[in-house]
Image (cartoon, rainbow, N blue to C red):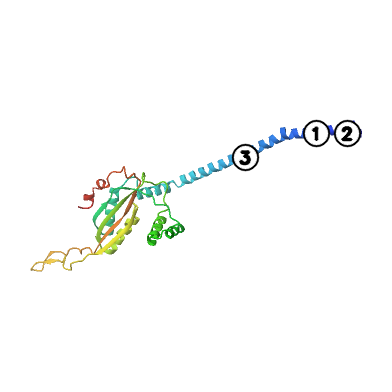
Amino acid sequence: MTSRNRLWVIGSVAAMVVILLLAWFIGIQPQLASLQALHAQQQSIDAQNAREQAVLDQLQADADDADQLEAEWKTASASVPDGTGVPDFINQLYALQTSTGVTIERITVSDAAPFVAAAPAVPVDAATDGSATDAGADPAATTGTSTDAAAGAATSTTLDASNFATLQIGVEVSGEYAAILEFVHGLQSGARLMLVNEVEVSTVAVDPNAGAPVYDESGALVTPAAPAAASHQARIGGFIFSLVNADEAASTQSDLGADQAAGE
C-alpha cells in the first residue's frame, strides 16, 4: 500500500470516528437525556396521582362512613366540649344521682386552669448518673421524679394553655355503699369525661330508733316509719376537661351558680 493510500485510510477512519462522536454528542446523548427526563417526570406524575388517588379513596371511605364519623364526633364533643360546659355537667351529676339512688350533698367546681404539658421523660440511665454524681441527693425523690415525668411524657403537641383547660371537681354524696360505687363508675363512664383521682368513703352511724313509726294510745299509726338514713358518705374528687382558653373563660363559679347547684 502506497503512502497516499495509507493516508486516505487513516483519514477515512478519523472521519468515521469524528462522525460517530458527533452523532453521539449531538444526536444520541441528548435524546437519551430527554428520555430519562421524561421517564423521571412520568414517575413523579404517577407518584402524585397515586397520592391523590389515596386521598380520594379516603374521602370516599369517609363519605361512606359519614354517619359513624358524625356519631364519633358527637361523642368526643360531649366528652371534652368546646367551652366549660359546667351546667350540662351538673345536669349529668343529678341524672346520675337519680339513677343510682345516692344523694348529692355538695358540688364544688374550680375555675378553669390552663393545661400544662408534662415534662419530657428522664431516661433511667440519666437519672441514675445524676443521683450518683450528687452525693446528697435523695434516691426516692429522684426515682419519683423520673416516674412522674415518664408517666406524662406522651402528650399531644396540639394541646396547650391557649386551647385546653382543666377544671377540678369535688362531689360529696351519701347513700348505700353499692350505690356510691355505681355513682363513681357513672362519673368515669358518663358522656362528659371525668378523671376520678380521689374517693374517700366513710361509714355513718345510724340511730336504731331514728325513723321508727309512732302510734297513739289506741294503737293507731300516727307517723309512718321514715326511710333508713344513709349508711355511707363519700367525697369524690377529679378533673373534667374543656377546649377553652382558661384566661379568657368566664368564672366557673358564676357559670355554675355554685350555691344553688350545691343545694346551699
Three-letter amino acid code at the position of disc 1: Met
Residue 122: % across, % down: 43, 55
Which residue is nearer to you in this view: 231 or 155? 155
Residue 142, above or below 113:
below
Residue 140, above or below 249:
below
The structure residue drawn at horizontal position 27% and vertical position 55%, both measured from the top left corner, is 170
Furthest residue toward right: 1
Residue 232, above or below 155:
below
Q: Residues within 10 Å of mark 2 (few under 14, many from 20)?
A: few
Disc 1 or 3, which lies upstream in sequence?
1
Secondary structure of the residue carrying tag 3 is helix
Secondary structure of the residue carrying tag 2 is helix
State which mark lies toward you, 3 or 2: 2
The structure residue drawn at horizontal position 57% and vertical position 42%, both measured from the top left corner, is 47
Three-letter amino acid code at the position of disc 2: Arg
Residue holding disc 3: 40
Residue holding disc 1: 16
Q: Are marks 2 and 1 in contact (CB under 8 Å)?
A: no
Residue holding disc 2: 6
Q: Residues within 10 Å of mark 3 (few under 14, many from 20)?
A: few
Residue 196: % across, % down: 33, 57
Q: CA distance from mark 2 to mark 1?
A: 15 Å
Three-letter amino acid code at the position of disc 3: Ala
Question: Quarter-wise, where is residue 49 in the image?
Answer: top right
Q: CA distance from mark 1 to mark 3?
A: 34 Å
Which residue is nearer to you in this view: 176 or 168? 168
Which residue is nearer to you in this view: 148 or 49? 148
